[in-house]
Image (spheres, rainbow, N blue to C red):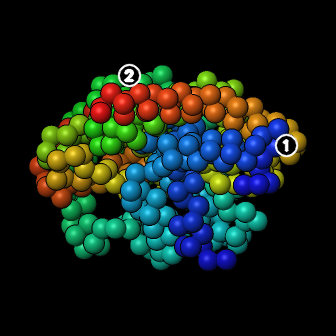
């Protein structure tokens, strides 16, 4: 830190301000580890389609079901779904309001990605249900270990 | 250089930087996820960059600027979703939420260039030379920005400390 101070600052001022700022912006516990592990897994994967932190077999089964449900839901909302056999289009990032099995509303912002990617939504306080979203192209799937229906409302880009 | 260890080491700083730039934990996570993905892609194809932290910070800063243009839309949706960024959240401790809100408020009062400068060194953990290169400015110019930002933030910090003392006194 010494190198980062300017000549007009006392060590106390520079160090105290930086510490105050760093503590205020401290990430929530586990977030950094989860993101780093996900990126590392992506870097090391060899055809592995899923993110880290989810048992592969369980995620495959759940995502299969969730993908079908999400496709159906999106199809009914928009009146048209992805046409089988065609390449997905590249829509801009969109906001989604979702509920999980506990009925907790979440806002997520997703961008279309060239490969499947997970976004893990941590449960709110007192909510046992974590939610995992996956998006690829214009396909969105929701995985909730508690099951149950989801409400997906696509918002503005 | 070990990629996994590097990712683990730089991610907390990236999250702090992204939160300081966006004021929103969800957006911050998105930005960091994108930055880490970019870093991993680069690493796999061209080997490790000279400074992985500076590389990822550059991506975060660029994406934050882009996402800032869409912030008005997000505010309405955040309110609809029960989120009000920068304010205390139910899953944060009250103390930390207040600390965060005050810091974000103080950061919002800074010039954009000053805000980026202080965040790159204090939150992102970059060295002065690395941070100056991220902003594409000279080291002396960068130090001026950081100094200016620290002076402004010091005033906010004193207010924060004063209010905390008052709260503690009232609690007793």
Q: In this view, does B165 lie to the left or right of A82?
A: right
Q: Position of residue B107 (x, y in %)?
A: 59, 31
Q: State the residue position of label 2.
A: B76
- Residue drawn at x 44%, y 42% as measured from the top left: B25
Residue A51 versus residue A133 in the image, above or below: below
Look at discs 2 and 1 and give the one toward the viewer: 1
Are callouts 2 and 1 both on one chain? no
- For residue A83, which numbered disc appears in the image? none
Residue B63 versus residue A141 in the image, above or below: above
Q: State the residue position of label 1.
A: A7
> Which of A57 and A119 lies nearest the eye of the viewer?
A119
Q: In this view, does A80 lie to the left or right of A9?
A: left
Q: Where is residue A64 in the image (x, y as percent from the top left)?
A: 23, 61
Q: Classify mark 2: helix, strand or loop.
A: helix
- Residue drawn at x 80%, y 54% as measured from the top left: A3
Q: Badge 2: how crowded within 10 Å, few (<14), some, or many (20+)?
A: some
> Which of A20 and A70 lies nearest the eye of the viewer?
A20
Q: Quadrant of the C terminus of chain A?
A: top left
Chain containing the residue with disc 2: B
Q: Quadrant of the N terminus of chain A?
A: bottom right
- Residue drawn at x 51%, y 75% as measured from the top left: A44
């Amino acid at each position: 830190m010494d190198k980062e101070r300017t000549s007009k600052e006392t060590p106390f001022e520079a160090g105290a301000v930086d510490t105050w700022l760093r503590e205020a912006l401290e990430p929530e516990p586990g977030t950094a580890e989860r993101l780093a592990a996900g990126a590392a897994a992506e870097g090391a994967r060899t055809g592995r389609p899923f993110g880290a932190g989810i048992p592969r077999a369980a995620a495959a089964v759940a995502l299969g079901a969730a993908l079908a449900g999400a496709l159906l839901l999106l199809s009914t909302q928009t009146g048209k779904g992805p046409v089988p056999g065609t390449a997905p289009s590249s829509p801009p990032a969109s906001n989604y309001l979702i509920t999980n099995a506990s009925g907790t509303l979440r806002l997520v912002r997703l961008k279309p990605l060239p490969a499947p990617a997970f976004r893990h939504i941590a449960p709110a306080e007192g909510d046992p249900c974590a939610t995992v979203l996956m998006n690829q192209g214009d396909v969105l799937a929701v995985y909730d270990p508690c099951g149950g229906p989801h409400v997906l409302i696509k918002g503005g880009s | 250089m070990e990629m996994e260890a590097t990712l683990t080491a730089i991610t907390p700083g990236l999250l702090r930087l992204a939160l300081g730039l966006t004021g929103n934990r969800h957006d911050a996570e998105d930005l960091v996820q994108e930055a880490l993905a970019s870093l991993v892609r680069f690493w796999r194809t061209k080997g490790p960059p000279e400074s992985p932290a500076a590389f990822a910070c550059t991506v975060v800063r660029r994406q934050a600027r882009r996402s800032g243009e869409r912030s008005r839309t997000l505010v309405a949706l955040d309110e609809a979703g029960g989120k009000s960024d920068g304010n205390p959240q139910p899953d944060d401790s009250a103390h930390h939420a207040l600390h965060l809100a005050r810091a974000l408020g103080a950061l919002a009062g800074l010039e954009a260039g000053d805000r980026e400068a202080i965040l790159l060194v204090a939150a992102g953990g970059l060295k002065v030379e690395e941070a100056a290169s991220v902003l594409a400015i000279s080291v002396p110019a960068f130090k001026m920005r950081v100094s200016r930002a620290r002076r402004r933030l010091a005033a906010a910090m004193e207010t924060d400390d004063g209010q905390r003392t008052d709260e503690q006194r009232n609690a007793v």
